Image: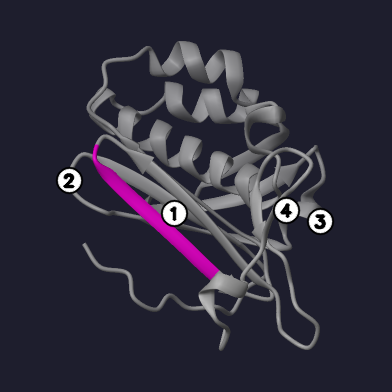
Amino acid sequence: LEADPASLEFRLGPHGKPALLQKAGRGVLSFNVSHSAGVALYAVTWNRPVGIDVEWCRRKIDYLGLARRFFTTAEAQALDVLPDKARAEAFFTLWTCKEAYLKAVGRGLTLPMNWVEVSLETGGRPTLKRIDGEESAAQRWSCLRLSPGSDYVAALVVEGHNWHINGFSV
């Protein structure tokens, strides 16, 4: 930022997402953070919104029940046909991608999880398919599944395409 840290000012968006108050002549720096069971991830971008989410996957939960209640019908059906061993990881991949998107747009869980539809392409790669039922809105975003450690699933959602990660390490 080439600025004295004491001069930085933050504000809260309408739904509580913190943001850096931008100074004239600079690009827009966006950031997001997520933590779960001792792991924290931070994402920082220039000139594009970003969201990140991490979840610890060793919890015993009713994946199909939660998916049927909070995910789209297509997502719940996709989980239903998976073998039990693959279902938990796929569930958390969908969840983290959805939550990372909702965080990127500054809404968090103020919107329902089924507002965002995610598809798991070949190899479990998440792709945003629809946002509020619109495919064109989803095409403006990209999602990357991250593996920050064993028993964790994470996703990074960034507006646009043709970006790369600097500094991800486990």
- Mark 3 and mark 4 residues within 8 Å of each other at the beta carbon: yes
Answer above or below: position of 73 versus 69. Answer: below
Instruction: Tell me the crowding category of disc 4: few under 14, some 14 to 19, or many 20 or more residues within 10 angstroms, Cα based.
Output: many
Q: Which residues are magenta?
A: 38-44
- Mark 2 and mark 1 residues within 8 Å of each other at the beta carbon: no
| Mark 2 or 1, nearer chain start | 1
Instruction: Tell me the crowding category of disc 1: few under 14, some 14 to 19, or many 20 or more residues within 10 angstroms, Cα based.
Output: some
Secondary element type, mark 1: loop
Residue 115 is situated, as x and y percent measured from the top left of the image, at 72, 33
Residue, disc 1: 125
The amino acid at mark 4 is Ala
Residue, disc 4: 138
Residue, disc 3: 136
Q: Is residue 69 toward the left or the right of residue 125 in the image?
A: right
Query: Foreground residue, 49 or 78?
Result: 49
Secondary element type, mark 3: helix
